[in-house]
């Protein structure tokens, strides 16, 4: 998993042609009609962007198969464009030197056996399809399973599925979404942000080789040991994010804005650190090609990161602010447990400092002997629903701010910003500073400011 590190996710299928994220299997196969399908272009983009592998959605929750499956007619063979997409992508990966991986939804809203009272009938169906996928397309490095929430865990018979995979592809890593739970007695998922203690949480889907929970981001102090039947197992975490600003996995008919390069860069560093990995969704549009604006962005990210085949993935600098003492001029509802200043420097992307005042200040104490030359700020933003049950749009609260350092008994401004923070505010300095304190002072906001993470970073130390 550490070797593959960075992959391109590809969502493509009937949903692409109906502008939806999830569908129930009622979209006819004839709706799938990419007029300029170019799977080789997808993989060329992945290669040029520095990805190590391609993760293809072979079957989403609707049950539509991106190959000609013997066990259903709800597949590409029943559509106007009968190209075996799984085969085309696998071939292109081999041609361009990338590893090939597959996503397969456990849930299936079109297969008749899925609704049968006897769960074994659907497991039989699923194993037959997985056999097709794992024997017909060469080496598969990852099987990414999704959709486990529709049934009781035991109904999936994961041990049978896992055994089959390892028999057909011994080196294929298996991951199951929502693998880890808070305890062995119920199905309460353990958020990745809380996974900071070894041997505290438990498998619900066992066995598996790595953890998943899209689109969550793990804690900076992410741990790897998890319990099943009293034994401890090592499980790294694979992050999944969308390149779209609106968190849509399937491309829409209207071109969508993509994330800022600064945010993508910081999420890359965060997600591939600590022996974990990152998959970025780069979906093709309804003609069957990745749009130029999307391709340009992800290729530009690879160039910025100087990604090279066979070379270690680049690292961010050393974080000197994690778990440092912090204070704020105000806290939402005086709830220090959930919204205190410390939450902005705890290494977690689900926790946040929240102010009650529109104009507020967050102050972090630093070791005055440690230098820094970059700041990365993840702001909590207001979110509006995209109307398709999944996608969203974000809006910054903070409209203007300063960054000040405390030196020689006075506050010295080192950055003054008069515009919204954007997806992720990254400030790079031409030389390094040392200070006993640093503060974010909000001078204009549309609502009380809130910060997920305020990171002070020494880019000269990438050890």
Image: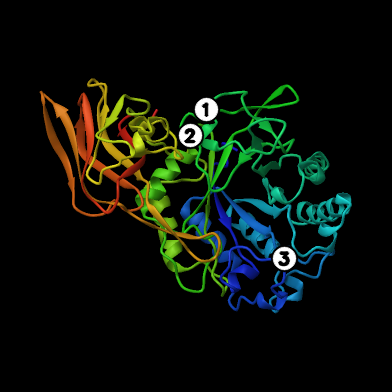
Up/down of 345 relative to 70, above or below? above
Residue sitting at the far front:
333
Residue 190: give x, y in percent of width and height: 60, 36
User: Mark 1 = which residue?
Assistant: 196
| Nearest to viewer (mark 1 / mark 3) | 1
Image: 115 above or below 52 = below
Residue where numbered disc 3 is placed: 64
Res 184 → quadrant: top right
Above or below, 198 against 39 in this view is above
N-terminal of the pair, mark 1 or mark 3, is 3
Q: Are marks 1 and 2 in contact (CB under 8 Å)?
A: yes
State left or right for residue 355 relative to residue 256: left
The residue to which callout 2 is attached is 219
Q: At which x and y percent is residue 299?
A: 43, 56
Q: Do the residues labelled 3 and 2 touch (CB within 8 Å)?
A: no
Mark 1 to mark 2 CA distance (whole Å):
7 Å
| Label 3: which secondary element | loop
């Amino acid at each position: 998993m550490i070797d593959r590190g960075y992959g391109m996710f590809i969502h493509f299928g009937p949903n692409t042609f109906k502008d939806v994220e999830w569908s129930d299997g009622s979209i006819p196969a004839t709706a799938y009609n990419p007029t300029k399908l170019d799977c080789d272009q997808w993989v060329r983009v992945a290669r040029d962007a520095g990805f190590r592998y391609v993760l293809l959605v072979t079957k989403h929750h609707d049950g539509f198969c991106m190959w000609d499956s013997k066990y259903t007619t709800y597949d590409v063979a029943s559509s106007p464009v009968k190209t075996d997409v799984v085969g085309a992508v696998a071939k292109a990966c081999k041609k361009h030197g990338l590893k090939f991986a597959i996503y397969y939804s456990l849930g299936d809203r079109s297969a008749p056996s899925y609704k049968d009272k006897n769960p074994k009938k659907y497991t039989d169906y699923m194993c037959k399809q997985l056999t097709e996928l794992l024997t017909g397309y060469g080496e598969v490095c990852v099987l990414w399973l999704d959709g486990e929430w529709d049934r009781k865990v035991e109904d999936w018979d994961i041990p049978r599925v896992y055994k089959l995979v390892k028999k057909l592809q011994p080196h294929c890593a298996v991951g199951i979404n929502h693998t880890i739970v808070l305890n062995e007695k119920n199905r309460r998922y353990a958020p990745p942000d809380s996974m900071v203690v070894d041997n505290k949480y438990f498998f619900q889907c066992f066995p598996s080789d790595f953890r998943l929970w899209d689109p969550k981001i793990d804690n900076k102090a992410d741990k790897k040991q998890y319990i099943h039947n009293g034994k401890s197992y090592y499980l790294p975490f694979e992050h999944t994010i969308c390149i779209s600003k609106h968190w849509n996995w399937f491309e829409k008919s209207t071109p969508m804005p993509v994330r800022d390069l600064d945010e993508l860069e910081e999420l890359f560093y965060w997600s591939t650190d600590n022996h974990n990995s990152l998959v970025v969704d780069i979906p093709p549009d309804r003609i069957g090609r990745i749009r130029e604006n999307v391709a340009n962005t992800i290729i530009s990210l690879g160039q910025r990161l100087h990604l090279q085949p066979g070379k270690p993935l680049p690292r961010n600098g050393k974080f000197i602010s994690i778990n440092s003492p912090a204070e704020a001029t105000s806290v939402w509802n005086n709830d220090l447990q959930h919204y205190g200043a410390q939450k902005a420097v705890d290494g977690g992307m689900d926790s946040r400092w929240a102010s009650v005042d529109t104009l507020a200040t967050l102050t972090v104490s630093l070791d005055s002997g440690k230098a820094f030359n970059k700041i990365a700020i993840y702001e909590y933003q207001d979110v509006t629903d995209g109307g398709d049950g999944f996608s969203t749009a974000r809006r910054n609260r903070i409209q203007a701010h300063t960054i000040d350092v405390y030196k020689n008994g006075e506050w010295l401004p080192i950055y003054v910003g008069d515009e919204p923070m954007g997806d992720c505010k990254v400030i790079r300095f031409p030389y390094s500073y040392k200070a006993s304190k640093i503060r974010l002072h909000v001078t204009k906001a549309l609502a009380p400011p809130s910060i997920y993470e305020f990171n002070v970073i020494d880019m000269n130390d990438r050890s």
